[in-house]
């Protein structure tokens, strides 16, 4: 049988999507269905004094749910139980849910928002990282700190005076909206007798299941979560859908009727989680050649009003803070702090884009002050086999970062264009420049995370030889169904068309963990490969197939086995690989089983008359192990780069008194087709022991490199250093004017 992995197979769900047969949650209707809306706070912090339902509406036609109607625990069960489904006495951020309304007429439900009046006793809020750290007001716990980590490697009392150069810098990144193409939406059916069933747009069905069981005080089997077709996620549909699912289910529970809740784009952008803003203070010591002697990294992220996934985001940002570089003496202190803004949460790369941006910008500054090139300072510090990361993880795979960088610089004509642009820039108001970033990204959950999840998958064969993959990992546009089918087809030596993937439904599929953290292909795909091999071995042990068999022989074997023994199913459960050990207390050890490695080069133009920046060309080179599907893999890189361009130059979330005020596609500026450069994608494939046929995670890697590469290129073009993103034209103008007076 011809190998399926490495071939650009037709997408499993492609036909249903292009023909319109695919059902998204807003396509689903049910008899007697009500439409639900959320009434939210209009202050950033305060005590709820009263709720009034104003005259002018037939309130008897409405279903109204407050925190008093919750049958179980009014808490969103995630990592830390600090966020209510509905505020009870106090609110801690603008647009916090207070009560829910439902009505048969969608427009009537929307109109009712204007007829609910809530009075507050306002309290003093805080809106910035520095205010939170300074304890201007204590708004969470004893010190406003959700979580903190410390990494200490080597001599933590390093003698900084012994270094030839000591470089210090401060860097900031802003919030970013995921902008998935489909807004958040859920439909729920619920009653005490049958329990709760929810259909919706989501990344992690079992997260929602975990959240709704205590909300309704029901046994696990009485809560069922089913993914409908999902139009994108990027982390924005990881933890947040639990809240919306809970709201729809609470209205359904009280009304006894199905309830649909679909956010408008403006509501979705105003209230859902976004990328954490960050601030980094970095101090590095170098010898005369630029080699790193010590790193001191102070990393802080803004978690918003509740913790959500801040500890997980902080963890990855912390571990990636020292980049793909070797340094004997490393000290990282990181904190996630509370502010009175809507909670921040998961977004592609979660934490790594923030700290990698800071360190890649910092290395360019260090190179400039030391008098070496940006290329040199990286080459003399690249991690090599046998060396250790900041957490003390010994690199056991063969990596040749010099070759990856060589490829990126060659394909982008970096050195040639640097010389050409130096001449060009002397006579032209539009300055051109080149910049690059080198980085890594760990695949899967950090440290002991995968062992804690203990993910389970299944592969089941039918009598006709058709094989079904059983997993909770969701297809959200990235190609999960296709990738899983290719992996199983190769493992069973059957045609790709004979494999399908079951709809993620907590009643029918095991918990394979969340669709996050670049874990779907490497971790879950690896388990699916193991389960498929186990199924094949079952047929072999039963004497129904030999080492080499045809498709017809496989079908016959399945039919015979099922008639004789019953269901033909193989289950695989995650086991921590040998040699992967992590200490959560000391924050040391093997943070990830393996890493993907990359070098990205940006070519930019900066108009010194309008101060606008544009990315003209972008080259990406990445080592991601085995590429399962070349077209989908390239699409992941291209999409990540496009989001990275937005992160660097366009997408600025604007808050006023803790409220998102540019929550529309007209005033939240994102890159259009005219703003996205030509993107060249190159893969360096290697053989490695983790993942199906050696495949590593890929989805989050391309979010890490674009922003620092772009700002490094802008500095190369203009000589102006900007250390905050997004860098809008007015930000660059201010930096340019300040540089003129230095």
Image (spheres, helix red, strand yellow):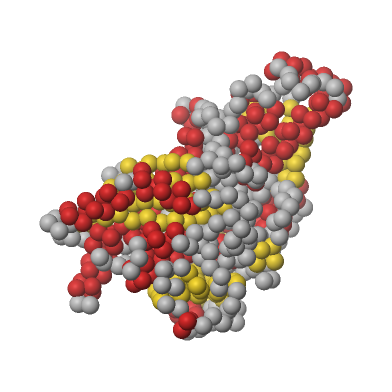
- The residue furthest top is 552
Q: Is residue 684 visible?
A: yes
**Could you tell whether 404 is left or right of 688 in the image?**
left
Q: Position of residue 707 (x, y in %)?
A: 38, 57
Q: Is residue 723 visible?
A: no
* 656 up-or-down from 635: above or below: below
Between 195 and 2, the one lying in front of the other is 2
Between 701 and 438, the one lying in front of the other is 438
In which quadrant is the C terminus drawn?
A: bottom left
Residue plotted at (57% across, 66% down): 390
- The residue furthest front is 288
Between 132 and 440, the one lying in front of the other is 440
**Could you tell whether 34 is left or right of 613 in the image?**
right
**Could you tell whether 107 is left or right of 435 in the image?**
right
Residue plotted at (66% across, 49% down): 513
Residue plotted at (75% across, 16% down): 553
């Amino acid at each position: 049988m011809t190998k399926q992995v490495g071939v650009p197979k037709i997408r499993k769900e492609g036909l249903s999507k292009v023909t319109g047969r695919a059902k998204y949650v807003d396509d689903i209707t049910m008899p007697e269905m009500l439409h639900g809306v959320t009434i939210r706070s209009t202050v950033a912090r305060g005590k709820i004094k009263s709720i009034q339902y104003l005259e002018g509406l037939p309130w008897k036609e409405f279903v109204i749910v407050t925190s008093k109607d919750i049958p179980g625990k009014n808490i969103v069960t995630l990592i830390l139980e600090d966020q209510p489904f509905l505020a009870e006495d106090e609110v801690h951020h603008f647009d916090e849910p207070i009560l829910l309304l439902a009505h048969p007429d969608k427009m009537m439900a929307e109109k009712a928002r204007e007829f609910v009046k809530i009075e507050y006793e306002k309290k003093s809020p805080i809106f910035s990282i520095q205010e939170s750290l300074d304890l201007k007001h204590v708004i969470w716990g004893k010190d406003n700190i959700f979580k903190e980590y410390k990494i200490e490697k080597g001599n933590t009392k390093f003698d900084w005076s012994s270094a030839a150069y000591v470089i210090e810098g401060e860097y900031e990144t802003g919030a970013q909206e995921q902008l998935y193409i489909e807004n958040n939406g859920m439909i729920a059916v619920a009653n005490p007798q049958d329990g709760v069933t929810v259909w919706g747009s989501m990344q992690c069905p079992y997260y929602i299941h975990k959240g709704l069981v205590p909300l309704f005080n029901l046994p696990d089997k009485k809560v069922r979560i089913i993914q409908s077709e999902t139009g994108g996620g990027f982390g924005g549909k990881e933890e947040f859908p639990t809240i919306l699912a809970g709201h729809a289910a609470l209205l359904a529970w009280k009304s006894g009727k199905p309830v649909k809740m679909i956010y408008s784009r403006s509501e979705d952008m105003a209230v859902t989680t976004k990328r954490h803003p960050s601030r980094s203070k970095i101090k590095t010591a170098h010898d005369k050649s630029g080699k790193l002697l010590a790193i001191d990294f102070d990393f802080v992220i803004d978690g918003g009003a509740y913790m959500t996934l801040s500890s997980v985001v902080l963890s990855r940002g912390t571990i990636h803070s020292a980049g793909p570089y070797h340094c004997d003496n490393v000290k990282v202190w990181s904190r996630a702090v509370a502010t009175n803004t809507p909670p921040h949460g998961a977004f592609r790369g979660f934490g790594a884009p923030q700290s990698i941006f800071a360190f890649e910008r910092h290395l360019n500054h260090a190179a400039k002050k030391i008098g070496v090139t940006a290329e040199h300072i990286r080459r003399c510090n690249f991690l090599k086999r046998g060396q250790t990361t900041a957490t003390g993880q010994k690199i056991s795979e063969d990596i040749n970062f010099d070759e990856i960088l060589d490829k990126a610089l060659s394909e982008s004509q970096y050195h040639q264009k640097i010389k050409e642009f130096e001449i060009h820039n002397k006579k032209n108001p539009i300055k051109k420049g080149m910049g690059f970033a080198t980085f890594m990204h760990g695949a899967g959950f950090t440290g002991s995370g995968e062992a804690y999840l203990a993910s389970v998958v299944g592969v089941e064969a039918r009598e006709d030889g058709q094989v079904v993959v059983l997993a909770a990992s969701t297809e959200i546009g990235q190609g999960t169904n296709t990738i899983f089918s290719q992996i199983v087809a190769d493992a069973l030596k059957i045609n790709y068309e004979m494999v399908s993937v079951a709809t993620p439904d907590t009643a029918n599929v095991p918990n394979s963990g969340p669709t996050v953290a670049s874990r779907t292909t490497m971790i879950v795909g690896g388990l699916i490969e193991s389960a498929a091999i186990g199924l094949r071995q079952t047929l072999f042990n039963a004497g129904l197939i030999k080492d080499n068999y045809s498709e017809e022989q496989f079908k016959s074997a399945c039919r015979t086995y099922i008639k004789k023994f019953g269901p033909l199913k193989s289950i695989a459960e995650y086991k921590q690989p040998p040699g992967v050990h992590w200490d959560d207390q000391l924050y040391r050890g093997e943070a990830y089983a393996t890493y993907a490695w990359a070098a990205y080069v940006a070519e930019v133009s900066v108009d010194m008359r309008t101060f606008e920046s544009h990315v003209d060309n972008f080259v990406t080179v990445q080592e991601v192990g085995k590429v399962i599907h070349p077209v989908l893999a390239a699409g992941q890189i291209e999409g990540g780069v496009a989001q990275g361009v937005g992160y660097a130059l366009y997408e600025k979330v604007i808050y006023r008194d803790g409220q998102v005020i540019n929550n529309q596609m007209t005033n939240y500026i994102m890159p259009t087709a005219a703003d996205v450069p030509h993107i060249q994608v190159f893969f360096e494939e290697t053989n490695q022991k983790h993942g199906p046929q050696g495949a590593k995670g890929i989805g989050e890697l391309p979010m890490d490199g674009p922003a620092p590469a772009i700002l490094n290129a802008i500095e190369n073009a203009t000589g102006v250093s900007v250390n905050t993103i997004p860098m809008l034209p007015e930000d660059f103008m201010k930096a340019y004017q300040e540089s003129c007076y230095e």
